[in-house]
Image (spheres, helix red, strand yellow):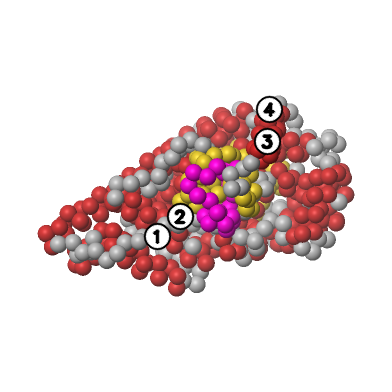
Amino acid sequence: MKHAFVGHGASRGLALGRARVRLPHALEVGEQHVPAAAVEAEAARLQAALEAARAEMRSLREKLQGALSREAIEFIDLHALLLDDPELVHALDTLIRQERYSAGYALRVQRDRLAAVFERMDDPYLKSRLDDLDHIIGRIHAHLHRRDPLPRGTAGEVLVCDNVAPSELAQLQAQGVVAVVSAAGSPLSHSAILARSLHLPLVVGAADALARTNDGDVVMVDGETGEVVVDPDASDLRRYHQREQQEARERRDLERLRSKPTRTRDGVDIALYANAESREDVARAHALGAAGVGLFRTEFLFLQRTELPDEDEQFQVYRDAVLGMSGRPVTFRTLDLGADKADRTGLALANEDNPALGVRGVRLSLLYDRVFDTQLRAIVRAAAYGPVRVLVPMVSCREEVLLVRRRLRRAVAVVRRRGTAVEMPPLGAMIEVPAAAIGVYGLVDAVDFMSVGTNDLVQYLLAVDRNNDALGDLYSPLHPGVLRLLAHVIGAGEQSGTPVAVCGEMANDPRLAPLLLALGLREFSLHPSGLLELRRMIRDCRHQDLRARAAKLLQARDRGAIERWLVQADAHG
């Protein structure tokens, strides 16, 4: 019988398929003991399951190199670390050898012990890591019983689950899953960001999903509105096919914009840059007419290995990116790692209670002089092949920028002494720390350009972890305080003649383009997959009209007023 429910649309797109329901993972394993003679074999069975799970992580990581890898690989690496965690591995072995527990029951006992530790933590971010623990325990348990931890289905299925990890999404799409509906999750989570990059429809926060869907039900999913229809009737199917045809027409229309300028209806040119981390990203950005690369993530070179990449290896990657853009500028963001990831690269740092606010970004680079100098020399050498810019993450004060500029000048001098004629590349700061945004007038004369990282800026400004489902409604770039701070930064850039771009998820959402244009933004940097859609939106806007309505926008007292402003902006073009 037909019924419908609504969640939050997290990744646009329509899908129609049979439901595959995955219930929340629970280790329903009763107390089991093995005879003394079987202990060694049971321990070996556990080790084989652990190694199979590790091999699965390695294989998945290799498949995800390139354009869509960043969000997923961070979680894959975290799960790989958990698989090698002594608190898990040694304890499991001890439970089997000393208590003579079966491998499955040992998994349950140790999972419950570690879960109790997580539950006692005050930090919401650390408490949320319990989901990662359950995910990896589920993989081990599946391998113990020689089952696929992510059961394979046939093409055209819709996964209905309690939650979905970023590390699963590409694997799901490869299996033919056409959409995902989850009972929990946030539209601003890592999973949602990756789903949008994969163009995989995703509905999150559909609390009734598991209770109201059965395996094999026909399900219609709208990843934009969040609507899920179970057993759709003839009128639903007719509506689905009409929308499908409309989206096909829109895709054809978008393709025609590849060679069109990004210009508003009243003739104002807007620069669209691409975020990238691979040659594939760069090639796609070039083909779609990006003005350049606004943010090239360099940390992927460091995270793919246990030793630090040398200067020549980095130079070759950076040079290829510059050549790939054929004269359009490439902006290299310097190493953006925190202590929670740095130890994977050989940069051993002390454990931090709150790595999000610890030694990361420019702080890490200035702490490790040799590593930073090596990276700067590699970037400077690449500048001999085309226009290059250097972008520094996690800047909080003017002094950090001045220190980086001094080191950048030194790198230029070294490269010149080696015989390569290069100019001093423009130096920019990422504005993602609230103090840098508030004190931006103390930075503008020390930098050549600025790029606002809205993901972290919003998170830090609102004191809300965007991956904490319980706080999903509080994390919003449409908070009046966020918009006023953005207007402050963009205004400082206008007054000083310093270019300002937005490179976070706000730039990736075409629905927010009128808002950003109203605030005075002239540069966007986003994933290549969103370039054409954003170009279409901007070409439909009248810049002068939006600027005239900026005052009303900044007078908004709540999110609802800002959303109403956006509706009116859309109605007026």
Identify whether 99 is placed above or below 348.
below
State the residue lying farthest toward the front.
1
Q: Is residue 204 magenta-colored?
A: yes
The residue beneath circle 4 is 252
Name the front one of labels 4 and 3.
3
Q: Position of residue 563 (x, y in %)?
A: 77, 54
Mark 2–mark 1 Cα distance, whole angstroms, equals: 9 Å
* Left or right side of 133 for 499: right
**Residue 6 within the segment the image draws in magenta:** no
Q: Amino acid at mark 3?
A: Arg
Residue 174 visible in the shown view: no
Circles 1 and 4: CB distance less than 8 Å?
no
Residue highlighted by disc 3:
238
Q: Secondary structure at mark 4?
A: helix
Q: Provide the secondary structure element on which disc 2 rests.
A: loop
Quarter residue 108 falls in: bottom left
Using the numbered discs, state the Cα–Cα distance from disc 2 to disc 3 in whole angstroms. Answer: 31 Å
State the extent of the magenta-drawn residues as a range.
Answer: 198-220
Residue kind at label 2, given as amino acid type: Leu
Residue bearing mark 1: 26
Query: Which of the labelled discs sits on residue 23, or is there none?
Result: 2
- Between discs 4 and 3, the one toward the N terminus: 3
Q: Who's the residue at 58% across and 31% down the image?
A: 284
| Of marks 3 and 1, the one in the foreground | 3
